[in-house]
Image: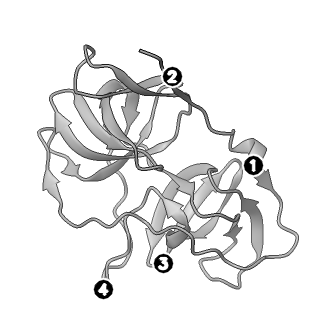
Amino acid sequence: MRRRVRQVCSALGALAVVVAAGPSDAGAQPVARDHVSAGPSGQPVPRFVSLRASKANMRVGPDRKYPIRWQYRRPGLPLLVVGEFDVWREVRDPEGDTGWMHVALLTGARTVMVAGQRPAVLRHRAEAGAPGLLEAEPGVTGDLLGCTGAWCEVRIGARTGWLPRARLWGVFAERPGRRGEKKPRTGG
């Protein structure tokens, strides 16, 4: 079987300092959490995790005997766990591809990816008119520090600031009447 390798540009290569804040881009919507249940691990499904390994295989089924669908080479890539079987997690990547990964390849450390067609402005405060710290190109990943309403605090490289939740893949859509998002658990 021919193996396909998926590589994405380094986050550091896609950053540029903001001189003036540009218009926003509402190109991507966060994943909606329609139904939450506890998987065999006792953790909620669906939930977001991130890729721990610098080289990780996504397989067609939950065992090493299954063929490899994709090979990832991007630690910190956010993934959505949509199913569990023993030590295997069925995951969906930001492009919508699904498959199975061993739990050792994943971490509960939360990351997000800038989505949409245009750069997103990392802002000093959680408000649209706040000063910009940098522009993050689509595909750039950062550490998720927490969310409040329509904004999420993110660390990209050495900068920490706020991005609109609607511009991120790796967080659930805000539910009406709900403020904030729980801190992530560790584990895959």
Query: Which of the colour schemes (rainbow, by chain, secondary structure, one colour) is used?
Result: one colour
Q: Is residue 66 left or right of residue 21?
A: left
Amino acid marked by disc 1: Ala
* Cβ atoms under marks 4 and 2 closer than 8 Å: no
Q: Are marks 2 and 3 in contact (CB under 8 Å)?
A: no
Image depth: mark 2 or mark 3 in front? 2
In the rendered view, tell whether residue 45 sits above or below residue 182: above
**Mark toward the viewer: 1 or 4:** 1
Q: Is residue 50 above or below residue 54?
A: below
Instruction: Name the disc covering residue 55, or none.
Output: 2
Label 4 or label 2, whichever comes before in sequence order: 2
Residue denoted by label 4: 177
Determine whether 173 is above or below 155 in the image: below
Q: Which residue lies under the disc numbered 1?
A: 14
Inter-mark Cα distance, 1 to 3 = 24 Å
Kind of residue at disc 3: Ala
Q: Toward which corner of the image does residue 170 lie, by quadrant?
A: bottom left
How many residues crowd mark 4 within 10 Å: few (<14), some (14–19), many (20+)?
Answer: few
The x, y position of residue 185, in whole percent, is: 32, 48
Q: Amino acid at mark 2?
A: Lys
Q: Measured from the top left, where is residue 158 in percent x and y?
A: 71, 49
The span from disc 4 to disc 3 (Cα, nearest Å) is 12 Å
- What residue sits 51% from the left and 41% below the top? 77
Query: Label 2, label 3: how many angstroms apart (C-alpha)?
Result: 33 Å
Does 53 appear above or below 37? above
Earlier sequence position, callout 2 versus callout 3: 2
Instruction: Tell me if 37 is positioned left or right of 25 in this view.
Output: left
Q: Are marks 1 and 2 in contact (CB under 8 Å)?
A: no
Of the residues shown, which amino acid type is indicated by label 4?
A: Gly
What residue would you read off at disc 3?
150
* Location of the C terminus (image quadrant): top left
Judged from the image, the secondary structure of the residue bearing numbered disc 3 is loop
